[in-house]
Image: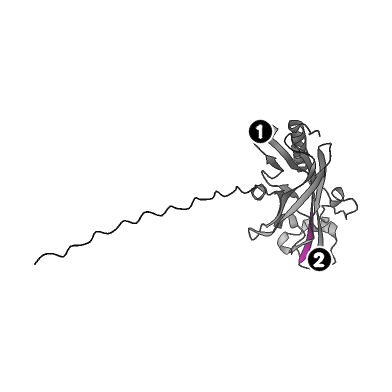
């Protein structure tokens, strides 16, 4: 069975990741055709009102929400399994495109869905088969400076003989607090492979049992003569 030339394949995958990052976020239709599309727009009338004076009131439409863009974590654009040399790489997952969708739920909540797509490539040391990798999605609250949501998802793809295959992920609706339509000012959305979790734990070395020390007889004290 042939394996794809890794240097070229990996460079293509990483190139797609950068292109997805520079090109901005897509709607979920690009990840899963048929998903509801959301435009990233804000009504003209709201631009004339200071943020502090805006009141969120239903009925709102999805088009009225400024959904936060998707950013890729530094070092999380790809998950590579194998040795440091190209010849020892077994396979690599790489992000090619991202998407998100926001929709109002109530007067003070909205739902967020995140989509990620990419490619799984087989390296010189790998072979066709089914592989998986952990992908983390995090929503950071810029007001509290804490993560409002974080979860690791398993992405999976089956590689045929041609050496690469697509993968895609769309999260469940994530319900978050909403105080205004400018959600991009309140939240930062990041995705990336959880490479720290992906590492295979090293086998623990079994310690040899300690050899008991030989017992030394204590000297017998001779009673002093009168």
The residue under label 1 is: 85
Q: Are marks 2 and 1 in contact (CB under 8 Å)?
A: no
Q: Can residue 191 be seen in this view?
A: yes
* Region of the chain picked out in magenta, as a range: 105-114
State the mark number for residue 167.
none
- The span from disc 2 to disc 1 (Cα, nearest Å) is 49 Å
Residue at left offset 43%, top offset 52% = 211
Comparing 79 with 147, the one in front is: 79
Establish if 162 lies above or below 24: above
Comparing 141 with 122, the one in front is: 122
Identify the image quadrant of the N terminus: top right
Residue at left offset 65%, top offset 50% = 197
Residue 153 percent across, percent down from the top left: 74, 54
Establish if 71 lies above or below 122: below
Residue 157 percent across, percent down from the top left: 80, 46
Which residue is farthest left?
Answer: 226
Comparing 11 with 65, the one in front is: 11
Residue 218 percent across, percent down from the top left: 27, 59
Q: Is mark 2 on a helix, strand or loop?
A: strand
136 in magenta: no
Comparing 61 with 204, the one in front is: 204
Q: Residues within 10 Å of mark 1 (few under 14, many from 20)?
A: few
Q: How crowded is mark 2: few (under 14 residues within 10 Å), some or many (20 or more)?
A: some
Q: Is mark 1 on a helix, strand or loop?
A: loop
Q: Is residue 23 visible?
A: no
Closer to the chain start, of discs 2 and 1, is 1
Residue at left offset 75%, top offset 62% = 180
110 in magenta: yes
The residue under label 2 is: 105
Identify the image quadrant of the C terminus: bottom left
Establish if 34 lies above or below 54: above
């Amino acid at each position: 069975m042939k394996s794809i030339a890794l240097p070229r394949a990996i460079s293509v995958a990483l190139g797609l990741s950068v292109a997805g990052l520079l090109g901005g976020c897509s709607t979920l239709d690009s990840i899963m055709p048929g998903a509801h599309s959301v435009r990233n727009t804000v009504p003209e009338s709201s631009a004339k009102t200071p943020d502090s004076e805006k009141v969120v009131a239903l009925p709102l439409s999805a088009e009225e929400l400024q959904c936060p863009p998707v950013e890729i974590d530094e070092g999380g654009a790809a998950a590579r399994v194998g040795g440091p040399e190209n010849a020892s790489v077994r396979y690599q997952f790489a992000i090619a495109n991202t998407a998100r969708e926001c929709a109002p739920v109530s007067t003070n909540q909205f739902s967020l869905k995140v989509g990620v797509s990419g490619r799984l490539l087989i390296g010189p040391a790998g072979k066709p088969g089914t592989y998986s990798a952990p992908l983390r999605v995090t929503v950071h609250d810029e007001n509290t400076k804490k993560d409002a949501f974080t979860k690791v998802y398993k992405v999976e793809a089956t590689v045929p003989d041609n050496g690469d295959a697509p993968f895609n992920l769309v999260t469940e609706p994530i319900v978050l607090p909403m105080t205004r339509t400018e959600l991009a000012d309140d939240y930062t959305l990041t995705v990336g492979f959880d490479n720290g979790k992906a590492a295979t734990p090293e086998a623990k070395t079994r310690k040899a049992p300690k050899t008991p020390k030989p017992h030394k007889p204590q000297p017998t004290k001779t009673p002093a003569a009168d």
